[in-house]
Amino acid sequence: PTATAHVTADEIRDRFSRAMSAMYQAEVPQYETLLELVADVNQEVLERDAALAERLAAHDELNRLGVERHGAIRVGTADELAMLRRLFAVMGMHPVGYYDLSEAGVPVHSTAFRPVDDAALARNPFRIFTSLLRLELIESEALRERAAAILAERDIFTADARELIALHESQGGLSDEQADRFVAEALETFRWHRDATVDLDTYEALHAEHRLIADVVCFRGPHINHLTPRTLDIDEVQRRMPAAGMNPKDVIEGPPRRDCPILLRQTSFKALEEVTRFKGERQGTHTARFGEIEQRGVALTAEGRALYDQLLSASRQQTQGLDNAAHQRVLSEVFADFPDDEAELRRQGLAFFEYRLSEAGRAAGRVEERDPEALIEQGLATARPITYEDFLPVSAAGIFQSNLGGGENAAYAGNANREAFEAALGAAVTDELALYAERERASRAAVLEALAG
Ligand code: OOG
Ligand code: NI
């Protein structure tokens, strides 16, 4: 067989994420403004905090900062979700995590398609939070059937995208030219369509059940609904958003500001009201697309996550209805119970770290000590926080709701169904905690092995 030179999955993902960003900048001009604001603030943070800049550079995070984005889409059927899994696989993006949003009153469940290994994450950690509509949670049988019938009529993929995905699977990769064509064809799935596939009455009936249902069912494709750059100072970006012409949601979701950032903090600007043409020549509007920013911190272990969830729910009563400044103040008080010191986070097993030999460690030769903490104290090893690459269901629900006008339906709650999601996906989702644990374990083992001589 002749060896065709294949483009790497990392390269295809990088091209795709850039194409997606360019498309969204053209579609949603405020997104371009947001990118500029985030780039300015990041630059200022790096200039003022040399230690942070050095650390990000040493751990392959400085380069990715400028390209780092996540986006989100919502699809309507199992077939659409399963095909997306194959599409994202071409770009080295695999389903990680199961998120039950029914708990927060939103009739979807979700996963994140993202790269999993260190090198791929360092190159471009592009992620797409992907939700599957749960028609089975709609109470009205007539509406449920109507929605299913509308969804059955559409194909969200181009014929060429389907062909190139199949080609990738059969030949194990794509050539340079095929990769470019794949990116162009895949992009079509995520494009905004101002023509709805239904008449205004149908749209309104679905909208009345839940805005999200109308968003998923009434259009030709799962338009990308936001792209999120990563900032190094979310409080500052939030502060500057109004002056830059953006209307931020009331509060920043997630943990409070800390010396050792944990998990993920997020905020967004409100969705745009966009002119939509319905069947039968009628015009209306639809709000779907918004802008979001995020600041990422260390990934937490199961114990750390349990403490986070506990403190977050403890703070919920007290933060009800507060503005962002007061909300953050209360959160900081409640989170005083969460250690804010790297050594303490390690010792208490609350967060994941990656171990490395220090310069001295590399020069040390054989060392008897086996305790990583002792090795760090002796200057032979270092530990750096492993960045959280995933999402938070409570924060996601807050983002959904700020853009759905408080659309929350308690009747959806208590319906986690990972098995059904995986059956629709056609694959199991990877457990995100297992990925972080393995990274930590492997890095610690490598340090100990090197010092064993
Ligand atoms: C997804 C919202 C979740 C995040 O950052 O938590 C999300 C959506 O609105 O479709 O993107
Ligand atoms: Ni998001």
Image (spheres, rainbow, N blue to C red):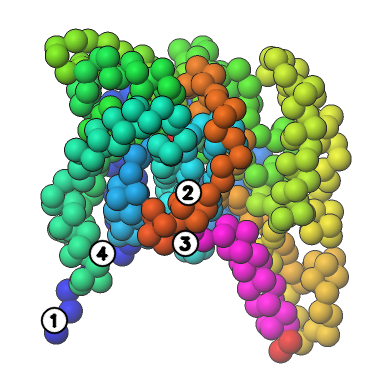
- Callout 3–callout 4 Cβ contact below 8 Å: no
Give the foreground label among 3 and 4.
3
Secondary element at tag 1: loop
User: Dividing the picture into quarters, in which one does residue 413 lie?
Assistant: top right
- Callout 1–callout 2 Cβ contact below 8 Å: no
Q: Which residue is mark 1?
A: 2
Give the foreground label among 2 and 4.
2
Residue 428 marker: 3
> What kind of residue is marked 4?
Val
Q: Percent x, y for residue 110?
A: 48, 45
**Does the image show residue 192?**
no
Which stretch did the figure color magenta?
428-451
Residue at image x 61%, y 64%?
A: 434
**Does the image show residue 387?**
yes
- Disc 1 from disc 2: Cα separation: 38 Å
Q: Is residue 280 above or below residue 212?
A: above
Q: Which residue is mark 2?
A: 111
- Disc 4 from disc 1: Cα separation: 16 Å
- Disc 2 from disc 4: Cα separation: 26 Å
Q: Is residue 108 above or below residue 142?
A: below
Question: Which comes sooner in the sequence, label 2 or label 4?
Answer: 4
Prevailing secondary structure of the magenta residues: helix
- Disc 3 from disc 4: Cα separation: 27 Å
> What kind of residue is marked 1?
Thr
Residue 153 marker: none
Q: Dot 2: few (<14), some (14–19), or many (≥20) neighbours within 10 Å?
A: many
> What kind of residue is marked 2?
Thr
Residue at image x 56%, y 42%?
A: 415
Report if residue 450 lies within the magenta region.
yes
Secondary element at tag 3: loop
Question: Which comes sooner in the sequence, label 3 or label 4?
Answer: 4
Give the foreground label among 3 and 2.
3
